[in-house]
Image: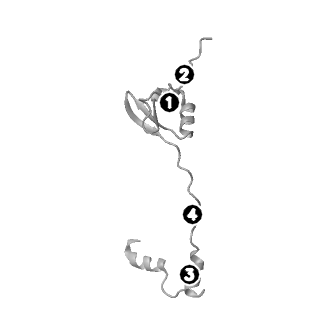
């Protein structure tokens, strides 16, 4: 059996490759060493991908999950405003249906 192709690891980053915490790699390098690229991104690095010297993509670390959203308790607020009594009037769905008229 012949020698298997051993992809070269991402080349050592030179000062020219580093611009404001950003590294570059060619499409070929990314195809053959995606695990290395992902490892760099996990460390917080941005990796710019080039094809024939032109930037075609950028891989950036995922944004951290935002804190859980505190949704207001609308039912409790309405109960506080109305004293727990039902609101009198026409239902919004009925108003919309009447306004749409013949369009349905």
Q: Quadrant of residue 38?
A: top right
**Neighbour tally class for label 1: few under 14, some 14-19, many 20 plus, Cα within 10 Å:** some
Residue located at (50% from left, 25% from top):
12
In three-dimensional space, the C-alpha distance between marks 1 and 3, rounded to whole angstroms, equals 55 Å
Q: Is residue 60 above or below residue 14?
A: below
Q: Secondary structure at mark 4?
A: loop
| Mark earlier in primary sequence (3, 2) | 2
**Neighbour tally class for label 2: few under 14, some 14-19, many 20 plus, Cα within 10 Å:** few
Q: Secondary structure at mark 1?
A: helix
Locate residue 37, reporting x and y percent.
53, 33
Q: Are marks 1 and 3 in contact (CB under 8 Å)?
A: no
| Mark earlier in primary sequence (1, 4) | 1
Q: Secondary structure at mark 3?
A: helix
Locate residue 62, reporting x and y percent.
53, 46
Q: Write down the residue under mark 1.
A: 30
| Mark earlier in primary sequence (2, 1) | 2
> Which quadrant is home to the N terminus?
top right
> Which quadrant is home to the C terminus?
bottom left
Q: Write down the residue under mark 3.
A: 78
Q: Write down the residue under mark 2.
A: 7
Residue located at (56% from left, 18% from top):
5
Q: Secondary structure at mark 2?
A: loop
**Neighbour tally class for label 4: few under 14, some 14-19, many 20 plus, Cα within 10 Å:** few
Q: In the shown orientation, is residue 73 left or right of residue 24?
A: right
Q: Write down the residue under mark 4.
A: 69
Q: Is residue 8 above or below residue 73?
A: above
């Amino acid at each position: 059996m012949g020698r298997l192709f051993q992809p070269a690891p991402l080349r050592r980053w030179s000062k020219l490759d580093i611009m404001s915490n950003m590294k570059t790699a060619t499409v070929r390098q990314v195809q053959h060493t995606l695990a290395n690229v992902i490892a760099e991104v996990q460390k917080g690095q941005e990796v710019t991908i080039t094809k024939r010297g032109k930037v075609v993509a950028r891989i950036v670390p995922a944004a951290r999950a935002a804190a859980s959203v505190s949704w207001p308790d609308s039912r409790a607020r309405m109960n506080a405003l109305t004293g727990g009594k039902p609101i009198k009037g026409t239902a919004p769905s009925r108003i919309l249906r009447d306004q749409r008229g013949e369009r349905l």
